[in-house]
Amino acid sequence: MHPQLQQLVALQDMMGMIREIEEKGSELEDMGFKTAGLDDLKNAREELEGKIDPQVMGLFRRLTGKFGRAVVPVIGNSCTGCFALIPASFVSKTNAGRLQYCESCGRILYWP
Amino acid sequence: MDIADVLKHTSSELFLPDLQATDKESAIQELVSGLSSGMNIQNPDTILQMLQSRESLGSTAVGPGIAFPHGRTLAVQQLSILMARSTKGVDFDSEDGGPTHLFFVLIAPPQDMGHQYIKSLATLIDSVQDTDLRDKLMAADNYEAFCAALKGE
Ligand SMILES: [Zn+2]
């Protein structure tokens, strides 16, 4: 996987985790989980954001603001953000070295 | 939700009867490689990173001798549960300082309807509070026996 994409996916997972703790933290604490490391996790998020190319980061933020999630999985040849079909040529090895975007909605594509 | 519903998300391919790792970092790696070979995952590093982030929040070894690593990631499309056991015990940074022998790893997609994985987590945590059950789980000969013990059969 493209290293930048790997970082974006990790960032998005991390953002989801932070949101989950902020929204459902008490439920998890009732089960016995500690969430004392939330600030550490937020620091790790900032650190990761700093490693990503600023231009890509800007786009990621815009897409997140617009859609909630900037990176979406491609499942069954479709963008799961807008359900547009992704051309087979996108999956080819020649494209593995760069980020790919849905031609229809612009979200960043990820093949799980 | 009862334990039988929870067990629908696992399989014999997602059962590791005896982990080799004894420290936290290599145990997480072993769990992730178990997940990626058991369910055909393209990007195991994504899951590894997610579980490491989760542990930085606070250790998931909250039961006596039991850990519940969990979280959501784009790398999976459905809730998947891996069960693992360690005879030697793993130093998983548990609350009581004791070694961890049982692992229930829950990985859910970001868009998990109705927080199915939180409910599964709660059910599992409730089910394994009993000391006798933990002994049975440690003694189970195979995946089927392990599940039967969990279901109280
Ligand atoms: Zn799209």
Image (cartoon, coloured by chain):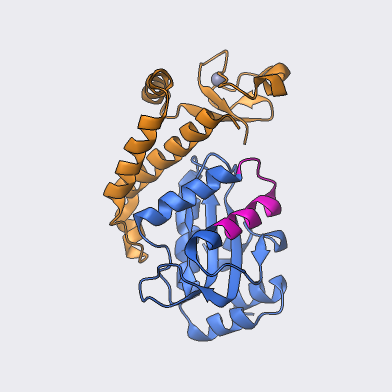
Quarter of image, res B153: bottom right
Q: Position of residue A84 (x, y in %)?
A: 61, 18
Q: Residue at x 36, y 62 (%)?
A: A33
B41 in the magenta segment = yes
Q: Position of residue B89 (x, y in %)?
A: 53, 76
Split into quadrants, the picture shows ligand 1 in the one at: top right
Task: Quadrant for the C terminus of chain A, please.
Answer: top right
**Quick check: can you spot residue A40?**
yes
Region rendered in magenta = B29-43
- The extreme top residue here reads A103
Residue A45 is left or right of residue B29, and the answer is left
Q: Considering only vertical position in the picture, is A45 above or below B59?
A: above
Residue B102 is left or right of residue A51, and the answer is right
Q: Residue at x 45, y 67 (%)?
A: B92
B3 in the magenta segment = no
Q: Considering only vertical position in the picture, is B50 above or below A88?
A: below
Quarter of image, res B137: bottom right
Chain seen in blue: B
Q: Residue at x 42, y 23 (%)?
A: A53
Give the colour in which the image draws chain A.
orange
Q: Position of residue A108 (x, y in %)?
A: 52, 23
Residue A95 is left or right of residue A21, and the answer is right
Task: Quadrant for the N terminus of chain A, please.
Answer: top right
Q: Considering only vertical position in the picture, is B125 above or below B152?
A: above
Identify the main secondary structure in magenta.
helix
